[in-house]
Image (cartoon, rainbow, N blue to C red):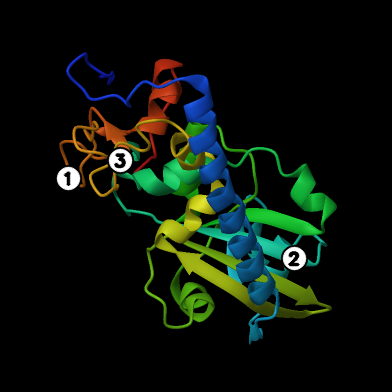
């Protein structure tokens, strides 16, 4: 597995004294606080969105066999479902690298549960193979397979086999969708990018607005895919090195 590092030829920030550094930090902190307040305002607007009813009996497959969407709430009022992309018939190494990254970062959900929220993964592929993949990756949170007419009904015109976060509210036996996002919207699931954004070189990806000369080795291509190293999603390598089987069956 290759590793990247900063070389002496790469640019670095200018060097200054502590007071000048702190002065510029103080100016940036004002913008950071404004950004937080803007985020709070957006969250407030999100809480005021209307909701739309969905079929609470939509079929899911779990380790208990066929269950309904209602069962995925596990008795709580709210459900956050991550819709995991699946490449049917492909190996573990060829599964969605982005979904693997985000799913790997969700481990401890007791704080969510304290607010009456269940978190679950809805894989858009067959249960048996995807459950093998889940085991290979060491994921322990609730895992369901959703396909066919149930997937069509729950996505309601949105394209299948894309990553989604969809939020639901249960009222008795009725289920309502309250929010959804896709693409970069699912970054809220993890903290890796947020932490990278605090560092001097950021995400080191091609699209970022960085000073001239800042390293950007990660391109949107097969050679320098920001989610992959040596033909695998980056987050799979610790599992491979630990000897876990990535055999998904036939």
User: Quick check: marks 1 and 2 in contact, CB under 8 Å?
Assistant: no
Q: Secondary structure at mark 2?
A: strand
The residues tagged by marks 1 and 2 sit, at their Cα atoms, a distance apart of 38 Å
Residue 157: x and y, percent? 42, 83
Which label's residue is closer to the chain start, 3 or 2?
2
Q: Secondary structure at mark 1?
A: loop
Q: Quadrant of the C terminus?
A: top left
The residues tagged by marks 3 and 1 sit, at their Cα atoms, a distance apart of 20 Å
Of marks 3 and 1, the one in the foreground: 1
Q: Nearer the viewer, residue 215 or 127?
A: 215
Q: Residue at x 53, y 35 (%)?
A: 23
Q: Residue at x 44, y 31 (%)?
A: 199
Q: Which residue is mark 3?
A: 91
Q: Quadrant of residue 115?
A: bottom right
Q: Quadrant of the N terminus?
A: top left
Residue 5: x and y, percent? 28, 18
Of marks 3 and 2, the one in the foreground: 2
Looking at the rendered structure, which numbered label has been put on residue 221? 1
Which label's residue is closer to the chain start, 3 or 1?
3
Q: Nearer the viewer, residue 248 or 154?
A: 154
């Amino acid at each position: 597995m290759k590793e990247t590092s900063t070389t002496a030829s790469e640019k670095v920030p200018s060097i200054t004294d502590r007071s000048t550094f702190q002065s510029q930090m103080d100016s940036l902190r004002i913008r950071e606080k404004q950004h937080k307040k803007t985020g709070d305002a957006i969250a407030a607007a999100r809480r005021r969105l209307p909701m739309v009813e969905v079929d609470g009996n939509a079929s899911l497959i779990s380790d208990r066999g066929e269950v309904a969407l209602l069962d995925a709430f596990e008795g709580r009022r709210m459900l956050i479902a991550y819709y995991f992309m699946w490449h049917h018939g492909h190996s573990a190494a060829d599964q969605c690298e982005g979904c693997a990254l985000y799913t790997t970062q969700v481990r401890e959900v007791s704080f969510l549960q304290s607010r009456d929220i269940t978190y679950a993964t809805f894989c858009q592929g067959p249960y048996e193979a995807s459950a093998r993949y889940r085991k290979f990756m060491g994921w322990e949170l609730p895992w369901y397979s959703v396909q066919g007419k149930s997937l069509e009904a729950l996505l309601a015109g949105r394209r299948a086999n894309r990553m989604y976060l969809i939020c639901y509210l249960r009222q008795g036996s009725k289920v309502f969708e309250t929010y959804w996002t896709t693409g970069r919207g699912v970054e809220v699931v993890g903290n890796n990018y947020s932490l990278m954004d605090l560092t001097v070189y950021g995400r080191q990806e091609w699209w970022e607005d960085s000073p001239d000369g800042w390293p950007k080795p990660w391109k949107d291509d097969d050679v320098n895919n920001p989610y992959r190293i040596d033909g695998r999603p980056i987050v799979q390598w610790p599992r491979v090195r630990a000897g876990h089987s990535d055999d998904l069956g036939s």
